[in-house]
Amino acid sequence: MGRTFELLTEQTAQNGVSKFLPPLADFQAGFVDRITTETKLPYSEFVGDLNKSESDAREYRLIRLPNGLVAMVIHDAVESKACAALDVNVGSLADPPALQGLAHFCEHLLFLGTKKYPKENEYNSYLSAHGGYSNAYTDLEDTCYYFELTYDALEGALDRFSQFFIDPLFAPDCTDREVRAVDSEHKKNIQSDMWRQYQIEKELSNPGHPFSLFATGNYDTLSGAAKQLCVDLRGELLDFHAKYYSADIMKLVIVGRDSLDQLTEWAVSKFSPILSKGMTKPVFKAHPLTESEMGKLIRIKSIREQRTLDLTFSLPDIKPYYKSKPGRYLGSLIGHEGKGSILSCLKRRGWATSIVAGRSPTSAEGFDMFKITVSLTETGMQSYQDVIRVVFAFIQLLLSKGPQKWFQDELRRVSEIEYRFMEKNDTVSMASVLASTMQNRHLPPECILPDCLLLSEFNEELLEWVQSFLNPLNFRILLAARDLETDFVSEEKYYGVNYRVDPIPAALMRDLQGVLRYDELHLPEPNCFIPDNLSVKNKVAADEPADAPTLLKLTTGLELWFKQDDRFLLPRGNIQVTIETPRAYESPLNSIFSQLFVLILKDSLAEITYDAQIAGLWFSIRESLSGISLQIDGFNDKLVKLLRILLECVKSYKVDDTQFEMYSREVRKKLDNAKHSEPYSHAQINTHFLNQAMVWRYTDKLDVFDLVTKSRLQSFIDTLFEQTRIQMLVLGNFSEQEALEAADIVLQTLDSLPLPEYARRVSRALLHNEGSYVHHEGMPDEGNVNSSVDMSIYAGLTESRTDRVLMDLLLLIAQEPFFDQLRTKEQLGYITYCSDRKYSGGMMALRLLVQSESNPTYVSQRILCFIRGFRQRLVDMEQSEFDKYVNSLKVRCEEKLKNIFEEASRFLQHISSGYYEFDRITHDLATLKAVTKDSVLRFWDRYINPDTAASFKSLTSTVWSSKIYRPSANDMARFSEPIVGLHGCLWREGAEKLSMQSVDEFVASASKSAKKADDPDDNVFKGLVALYKANVPATLSEEDVAKAVEKITEPASYVRTSLEMALESRRCAKTSASANGLVNGWTHDGADVANGAAASPRASKVNLVNIGAVRTPGGSWLFEEASAYRASLKQSGAPIPVRHLEPKY
């Protein structure tokens, strides 16, 4: 495929827009030459005003390095974490057509070793040891790399980070493995409607434009394509990096506690060696959407139950117009949800539930798109042409009235308030966004920081010009639904999407070009929620802000907590109200009613509250185990007004026929769609169900959904608040009296009887028995190629401060090695991580999760092998390395709160848990001082190591793809896990006729001839290949068989690893002298202890045969019916507060 591009230095102004286009930003004027303090290296510094927010306490410096790289260094005196982000202004648009996905592949591989730091996981190991992490993303025109870690380890991270852009290795063995990681990432997305639709949009764009290519890449477009072209993929990667990774098109942001001079020193000394190639990024001629692509109706079949209408308009590049931001102006009007809006009109007819409008995220320099996305109801899909008529009627209204200065002034006023009183947010997100923002060539230095929020001018002529592109001759329609009634005549190559393309119906096009009118459509009214009073009650921040709110009232019906802001000194507040009512979650049916009630409430409130959200207020209504929760956040001036509006609607709502029909279908749609979640999500759902006493699964709700009627819903709502208990937190720029008044509003509006303490619903943990338990389930979505394993090993009590700190520290130590071994080295699956879970009233769990194309039994074995080998890592760890992890946990505990929302969330977590441990961080820090490496080892051996734990407890949730062989319960009871795992590995490669008995017999025979289990000889592999070939179906081509054989026998093959484990298991069966029947993790009778099973002396003492479970040779109980197993477990008691609750009034 040929492509034409030109460099930015050669690019002419866009046709017809030169009178609007602002000049290119000048990064010469306003800069003065400097030299660094220590190394005396040259750089230039911007000495003008960067116009930071007056509420921002950080210090900023904008510099330009001699190689052309522009960097923003940011000093934050109180931030516990440091971070950096580097944005390379080249992305997937630069992919060679013959090697699609190369830019994304480069992003993957860049992290894995450099000339200075050749160890492939050196970078991530360093970050992990200092409580950090890294990530990256590849966009159309950007590839952004970023990391975060403790503030005191920044220099070492920057030194490692900079080398990726100076001298990366792209080691051949890493190259081969990481292709499979890219392939795994793509396969993870195959069943995602978002990715499927995006690829259809690309495929049906201008074929001469690189937007039309496949950006993610997979094994075929990378390794496969390279082989077909007879080129070296690594060589192509090196060429890509050498060509595009130039300092000229890089923007760097560094945030740290160190001084600006020190941060500047590091930026200049470490990033100046990046080569400057005199290269500016390529900008491609033409537009992805030309006249040939317009006027089309595209229909696609979705995976999930959905009905989506997308209208896409072709625009010239509007990103340069940073002062007036025409995309925000048009998106705010077209996507408005108040009275007179498009959405209001559609909802009244029962056609739609939501609308989103604005500049498309799939835009890049040189072209733009404006998208209007409408979520349709079933009726709306049938009437999609009328929906489009409503949209165009509103567009005609906008065009006829012209740009509205008063509306732009409102947006400007809100943006000024938001920027003036801007809250601090996640540091690494700020850095990555800022690095990307700096790539706007028209954005001058003084506008970089405000660009995220500020809108500064009204340009009537520009807005008229931009909105003129919203016309019937310049758009195309995309309809996506699972139940579209049409003949799909085409199939997309990479995701297998069924679609068809037709011209837009002629009658519809005639109507859109004529005059359209709907009387209820009109422009928004002035916004009454824009704050007037922005004064702050507390003028001076406390030296030591209070770490707990004050309990103002505690009665049978009310628990009121309050804290006036003494930390941030902003005119902002946060009010959280939990209306405890047992009826909300007492059955699956009531859970549906609660969910439906919340959805309808949000819909009813939309017209009233949309302006509040525009004006900087945010609210949430959600159902929970305990009842209905409201949360309101934003400028405090109008927060209580918004609270009253929400409560009045909650209390007095009457079910409307149209709303009931719309949203009951929406709830049903969400429940139906749950089956299409990723396998790891299903595993997590099952794990949650088997650990919490009060949980309803989506399947439980689907079973009773036919009982949902309008009258039953209304009856439920009418009685929902008869008896309640209010748990309330008021935090921020409020007085104590205002908090008491807010509580009175809640009580008076609800007018409920108080709920007795014994009737409250609190979270209770399920208590697992000693032993290993495995839940065995098929993946509900038959199209998903992945399976998943979610293994929980129970360790320590949540209430124990010592256990809690030890678990936090262990997790910090284990995360990177687990990822490195199972994801990077073994390439088991793209989604691989370990985490913890602290169950209220019960035990904590170390959770190890992998989503993989491999069979779950094999994956479970690999997880257990990691667990068994990890103890030695702890033993061998140097004290200095251990101290780094301890310090990282200390820094994490000491991390400062960034905003009122974070502080409120922390307080609410302690309140809702029932423990009220507001000083938990203080206790954890004190406990951490006493932690030693020996205490960590003792904790590991006591709970997590299956070879030593006296009462080892584990639960493994396995979800099996329908694309692989799923063994029956009888198979699992008869054959050892290594045999089941090896059978699954061979079956995955095509040996579909192979029986488990044959595998067992082969391993038994091979174990006699193999000299070493961990290094099978050629004869063993010849036998394995022969066994494989004898059991492939005739439909498998000779070429495919040859490829599979090559894969099976390669040194790093997962089949080889599985065979080694099976032979080791058989070898141990012959070794009668092994202590307690264990050698390297296998029992003396030849059965393995995969899935967390300990040796037989520590096996489970319970008998689950009568609830349909089977016992595996390794001692695990395997069950398929989760409900029966769950019912056999005991529950924890309610949490006991760690402090006496004494109210002030």
Image (cartoon, helix red, strand yellow):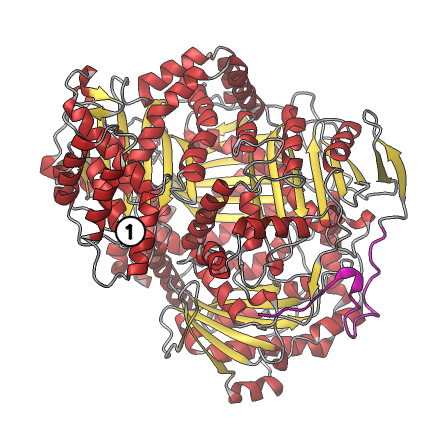
**Location of residue 538 in the rendering, given as x and y in whole percent from the top left corner:** 71, 31
Residue 102 shown left or right of residue 5 in the figure = left
Q: Main secondary structure of the magenta part?
A: loop
The image quarter in which residue 280 lies: bottom right
Q: Is residue 1038 above or below residue 798?
A: below
User: Would you identify the image quadrant in which residue 790 lies?
Assistant: top left
Left or right: 154 as drawn, with respect to 841: right
Name the residue tied to disc 1.
Answer: 989
**Outermost front residue:** 1019
- Neighbour tally class for label 1: few under 14, some 14-19, many 20 plus, Cα within 10 Å: some
Q: Quadrant of the N terminus?
A: bottom right
Q: Residue at x 45, y 50 (%)?
A: 185
> Is residue 15 located in the magenta-colored stretch of the structure?
yes
Number of marks in the rendered image: 1
How far across and how far down the image is residue 955, in percent? 27, 33
Q: Which residues are magenta?
A: 1-26
Tell me the residue at 69%/21% (across/down).
Answer: 543
Residue 837 versus residue 762: which sits nearer the camera?
837
At which x and y percent is residue 174? 49, 41
Residue 486 location, x and y as percent?
37, 79
Between 351 and 770, the one nearer to me in the picture: 770
Query: Image check: 1026 left or right of 423?
Result: left
Residue 844 visible in the current orientation: no
* SS for dot 1: loop
